[in-house]
Image (cartoon, rainbow, N blue to C red):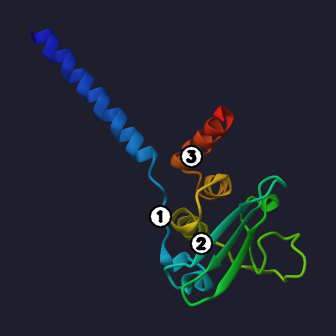
Amino acid sequence: MIEKKRLVLWYGIILGLLVALIFLGLRVPRYNPAGVHPDLLALKEPFSSVKAFYYFDGGSIGVEILDAAGKDLRLALPVNHRYSRLFFGKTHLSERGAVAAEVPFSEDSKRFIAEIIDTYAERGADRNWALLYLRKAPVDRLRVWWEEISFNLN
């Protein structure tokens, strides 16, 4: 009887540790508003439209945001700089006709963009891949993995 109680106790401890590890592993990093680019913070929620684009040039990311005031902001994060540079005005640097301006880019701005995509962008592969490369959270890896499994089953 005592051995059975001890075994149940150990199973409970192990299960609790697994749940804690999963919970901590699925947490998404938050941004500090003080570190976010002012033009991003100036956007008015709720956003009318948010589109994420994942390009097959190695993984460049583009984002199109239309805010509640009608302001349209197009963002490009080129893969060749490991997402360390941000451009306003285009969703991809090869886009013709539009002019792109590089702006200072911080980790907090990257997290802010990721949160916008996560909250407002339509569900799908582009959104999942963009989130995976912007914030590298385990939950995003699971989404991409699930999408690949679901796609392969169909």
Residue beneath the point at 48% across and 56% down: 28
Question: Is 29 situated above or below 88?
Answer: above
Height in image: 140 above or below 151?
A: below
**Label 2 vs label 3: CA separation?**
22 Å
- Within 10 Å of the Cα at label 3, are there few (<14), some (14-19), or many (20+) other Cα atoms? some
Label for residue 143? 3
For label 2, the residue is: 109
Determine whether, in the image, residue 17 is placed left or right of residue 142. Answer: left
Question: Mark 2 or 1 closer to N-term?
Answer: 1
Please report whichever mark, 3 or 1, sits nearer to the chain's N-terminal start.
Answer: 1
Could you say where residue 82 lies in the image, as x and y percent from the top left?
74, 58
**Compared with residue 55, is residue 108 higher up or lower down, i.e. above or below?**
below
Residue underneath mark 1: 30
Q: Which residue occupies the extreme bottom position in the image?
A: 69
Q: Position of residue 30 (x, y in %)?
A: 47, 64
- The C terminus sits in image quarter: top right
**Amino acid at dot 3:** Arg
